[in-house]
Image: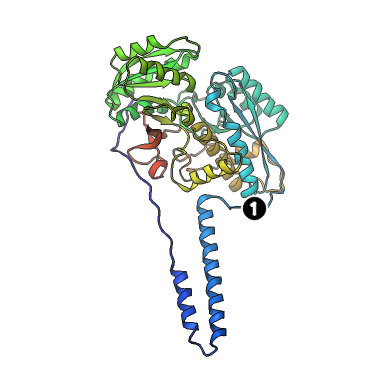
Amino acid sequence: MLVATLGVLSLVAASCGGDDDDAADTATTSAEGATEATEGDAATTAAETTAAEEDVATTEAETETTEAETGTTGGAAEEPTGTPVKIGVIYAETGRTGGTYNTVDDVANAWAEWVNTEQGGVNGHPVEIAAVDDTSTGEGAVAAARELVETEGVVGIVIQDSAAEVATVDYLAEQGVPYIGGTANNRPVDGGDTSWPNTHFVTAPSNPGTAAGTLLAASAIGQTAYGATVCAEVPACAEAGQLYQPVADAVGIEYVGLVTVGAADPSYTAPCLEMIAKGADFINLGVAGETGLRVIEECTIQGYQGPFGAANNTVVASQFEPVEGLRLAGVINGFPWWADAPPVDAYNTALETYGGVDGRNPSATSTWAALELFRKAMTEYGPAADAEVTATDVVDSYYQVQDETLDGLLPSPISFVPEGPQPYVPCFWLFDMQDAEFSTVTLGDSGNGATGDLQSSCFSLGG
């Protein structure tokens, strides 16, 4: 039986502090006192010069403090001179899920340029990105993995495509090249598959937590009858129905059933009418983004007036925000790009500076978080700049990562173990979008220690 431990639902607003002007006041007082000195005008000039210098020093100190908080230097750092490190990215640029993942390579390249320009590389090593399109297929993912390992010589791979994770897991384990993050849509929970390699370093939540997330979000915004549309192309999509009923019982919301829809279907009239007839007041879109937009349009035409749900990488702001009158709620497995917090500010600033990338989607934010965890692990535990970095070095460094949240960029404290499958990530971010504005819905205590819109929520299983 699934058991959800629910806290008080609340929206939490972030706050910020002000500046301290004491240094400037002190400098002014010193200058006024100096005018009474016997040296007269010369002393006054000297005092004014001193005050001006103190003002400059105060400004520089405030600037340095701001840069430390945001993780940016505001300019070029010392150029990394160590041996280069190449990171692989497998993602869907084209195919069925291309519209969901097609900014991932731009985000990864912006991160690399930001790190090399402003952070001095990774522990003195310049980083390079090798990104390969898997065409939204398992076969394409395997081919991409082979290219990255055997031709590009990458030391770790970020995966951003629901079809790629399971398809590549055996090959990467055989080659000793670690999976270093992305969005874990298909990884089994603890106890489900003890053969899952311990070089598969999970940085994002997967089922059953994320499947439960849309039910939790529906309940949080006051809906009472949950229905779902799921993709017809992948059998695992319909398997989510096995989770919906017990989670709905735990949450206290009615589950009215699901319908399958295919991206190539000429019309979605029938599934929309079925959801309406079942009395659904919340329709979840367990489909690719473009398909979801068609479902929204058709169900609205048929008279549905309630909110829709979306989960994980399908939540692409540029696709949903333009839909007039749309209310969307659900769960994401990458940190919220709308959060007012220093590490998120650094993310948005870097994407704007290095390529003008639209990073308003969780495949983008989870890519950044995975790469930032790589930087943290390799800086603290990896080889020095004068040594070559290998895949084995990456694995050994990740085993030393304990209780890491990256100041809220990860959904819960991440710890890795040298034996057995890596721990399941039980937390995620719930959201509500109204009038084209996203906000975070919080559920009980913070899962990652963050506050405001960066605060995550968690779902626990019990029996």
Front-most of residues 363 and 370 = 363
Residue 195 visible: no
Q: Quadrant of residue 440?
A: top left
Disc 1: which residue: 77
Front-most of residues 32 and 284 = 32
Q: In which quarter of the image is residue 85?
A: top right
- Going by the image, does 15 lie left or right of 121? left
Q: In which quarter of the image is residue 112?
A: top right
- Across and down, in percent, residue 329 comes to 37, 29
- Across and down, in percent, residue 223 comes to 29, 26
> Is 241 rendered above or below residue 42?
above
- Give amino acid for label 1: Ala
Front-most of residues 290 and 322 = 322
Residue 453 visible: yes
- Per the image, label 1 sits on a secondary structure element best described as loop
- Across and down, in percent, residue 178 comes to 60, 32
> Is 217 rendered above or below residue 68?
above
- For image coordinates 55% across by 38% down, the residue present is 368
Quadrant (top left, top right, bottom left, bottom right) of the C terminus:
top left
Front-most of residues 293 and 184 = 293
